[in-house]
Image: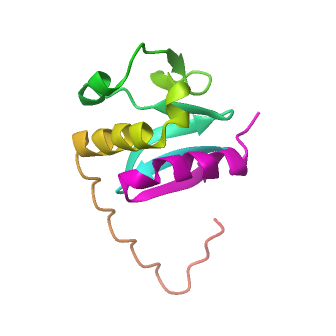
Amino acid sequence: MSSDASFMQYVADQCARAGGITFKRMFGEYALYCDAKVVAFVCDNQFFLKPIEAVRPLLGTLDEAPAYPGSKLYWRLTQELEDAPLLARIVRASADAQPAPKPKAPKKPRAPGRSTNS
């Protein structure tokens, strides 16, 4: 089962106070970004926060679960989704605790006359 676009938009709206919130659809699910850093996944209409120790003090009892079959364990948030100011603090703390994303290497130009079908 994949996540609903309306649920993802709700999550993004709840996190908006963190600043720099975007999301990207990936394999029927979503990655949530804050300032271009992946902070969480939304899978099967559930919110899975990357486990970052700097964020732990903001959370109560932790529910750890895989975001998708075969994934490592993430912190599954439920009640926190209803508290927009708290969720924004959690997302902001997660982004602040992560290093800046590495810049992408520029794409190499294709040789003239080369087909993309090999």
Residue 39 percent location from the top left of the image: 40, 41
Name the residue at 51% across, 24% down: 76
* Residue 46 image offset from top left, x and y in percent: 62, 31
Q: Residue at x 51, y 30 (%)?
A: 48
Q: In this view of the protein, which residue sits in the foreground, 31 or 89?
A: 89
Give the residues drawn in magenta, as a range: 1-28
Q: Residue at x 45, y 23 (%)?
A: 75
The residue sitting at 57% across, 45% down in the picture is 11
From this viewpoint, is residue 26 visible?
A: no
Question: From the viewer's perspective, is 64 left or right of 7?
Answer: left
Classify residue 3 by image quadrant. Answer: top right
Q: Is residue 46 visible?
A: yes
| Residue 32 position in % (x across, y down) | 49, 47
The quadrant of the image that shows the C terminus is bottom right
Q: Is residue 65 placed above or below 22 in the rendered structure?
A: above
Asked if 62 appears above or below 103 in the picture, the reply is: above
x, y (%) of residue 18? Answer: 37, 51
Answer with left or right where residue 11 lies relative to residue 61. Answer: right
Q: Nearer the viewer, residue 3 or 117?
A: 3
Magenta highlight on residue 68: no
Describe the colour scheme in one phrase: rainbow
Q: How many marks?
A: 0
List the single residue furthest toward the bottom. 112
Q: For the N terminus, which image quadrant?
A: top right
The magenta stretch spans residue 22: yes
